[in-house]
Each structure stands twice: as C-alpha cells, then as structure tokens.
Image (tube, rainbow, N blue to C red):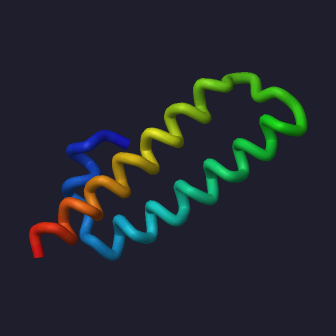
C-alpha cells in the first residue's frame, strides 16, 4: 500500500486496515516459522505497511 493511498483513508479505515495488516503479518510469521515461505520478502513488505499505517495514525493524532 502506497503512502498516497494511505493518506486518502479516514482515521477509522486506517485503524481497521492496521489491525488487518498486523494480523496478516502475524499469520505470515507463523507460516514462515513452520515452513519457509516461497517469497520471504512478503514479511518485509507487510511489516513496512504496518509501520506506514501506524505512522499516519500518529501524525493525525498529533495534529488534532
């Protein structure tokens, strides 16, 4: 998910997307622990998306 897409989301949508993405990351980590993922770069991409979403939420909280 790109930063421009993230900025267009509402705060409620951001929070929902963040929880979904965190769950997805946890599931990927567990799957990778059990048997190596075909594309381990997915872990990095999902982790960075979590950070992007959390950063945008923090920015919005600081402004208000």
Residue at 11% from the left image edge and 76% from the top image edge = 64
Residue placed farthest to the left in the image?
A: 63
Is 56 rendered above or below residue 40? below
**Residue 34, image x, y percentages:** 89, 38
Direction front: furthest residue: 62
Give the number of marks.
0
Q: Nearer the viewer, residue 21 or 8?
A: 21
In the rendered image, the quadrant that contains the N terminus is: top left
Vertical placement of residue 51 versus 40, above or below:
below
Q: Measuring 40% from the left and 47% from the top, which residue is drawn there?
A: 51
| Relative to 10, residue 56 above or below | above
The residue depicted at 52 percent of the width and 65 percent of the height is 19
Task: Tell me where residue 10 sits by quadrant.
Answer: bottom left
Asked if residue 34 lies left or right of residue 5, the reply is right
Q: Please state the horizontal and vertical placement of residue 33, each as a whole percent of the image.
A: 83, 37
Question: Whole-percent x and y of residue 17?
Answer: 44, 62
Q: Quadrant of residue 29?
A: top right
């Amino acid at each position: 998910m790109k930063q421009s897409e993230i900025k267009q989301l509402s705060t409620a949508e951001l929070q929902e997307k963040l929880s979904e993405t965190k769950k997805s990351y946890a599931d990927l980590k567990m799957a990778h622990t059990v048997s190596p993922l075909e594309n381990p770069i997915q872990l990095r991409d999902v982790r960075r998306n979590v950070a992007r979403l959390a950063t945008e939420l923090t920015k919005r909280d600081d402004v208000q």
